[in-house]
Image (cartoon, helix red, strand yellow):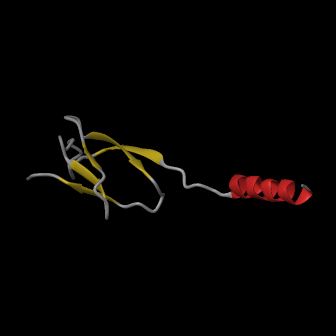
């Protein structure tokens, strides 16, 4: 019985110690070299299908899974 309790306690500790990656939201404003907003630009996470579009003022918000994710911004000329 003590072995079962010890195994359950070890499993519970392992689950608590397991660090899951935390996602977070990146927000920003896309502007051109003159500081004008780039309306409806595309913002994607490189290497994934995840993405969003900026609003009419160039503002965007996107959920990323890592601080190492790279955002790729594109817009029609």
For the residue pair 41 and 69, the one nearer the viewer reads as 69
Q: Residue furthest left?
A: 77
Picture coordinates of residue 33, whole percent (x, y):
21, 53
Picture coordinates of residue 46, whole percent (x, y):
31, 62
- Residue 17 placement: quadrant: bottom right
What's the residue at 24%, 46% (across, down)?
31
Q: Residue furthest front?
A: 1
Q: Residue furthest top?
A: 56
How many numbered badges does the structure rendering display?
A: 0
For the residue pair 36 and 65, the one nearer the viewer reads as 65
49 is higher (above) or lower (below) than 30? below
Q: Would residue 31 be found to the left or right of residue 11 on screen?
A: left
Quadrant containing the N terminus is bottom right
What's the residue at 19%, 47% (across, down)?
41
Q: Residue furthest right?
A: 2
What's the residue at 15%, 52% (across, down)?
75
Q: Would residue 15 be found to the left or right of residue 9 on screen?
A: left
- Residue 15 placement: quadrant: bottom right
39 is higher (above) or lower (below) than 32? above
- Residue 37 placement: quadrant: top left
Q: Would residue 2 be found to the left or right of residue 63 on screen?
A: right
Picture coordinates of residue 13, whole percent (x, y):
77, 55
């Amino acid at each position: 019985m003590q072995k079962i309790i010890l195994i359950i306690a070890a499993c519970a500790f392992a689950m608590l110690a397991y660090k899951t990656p935390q996602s977070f939201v990146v927000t920003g404003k896309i502007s051109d070299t003159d500081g004008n907003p780039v309306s409806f630009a595309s913002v994607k996470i490189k290497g994934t299908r995840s993405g969003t579009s900026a609003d009419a003022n160039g503002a965007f918000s996107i959920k990323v899974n890592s601080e190492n994710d790279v955002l790729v911004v594109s817009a029609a000329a």
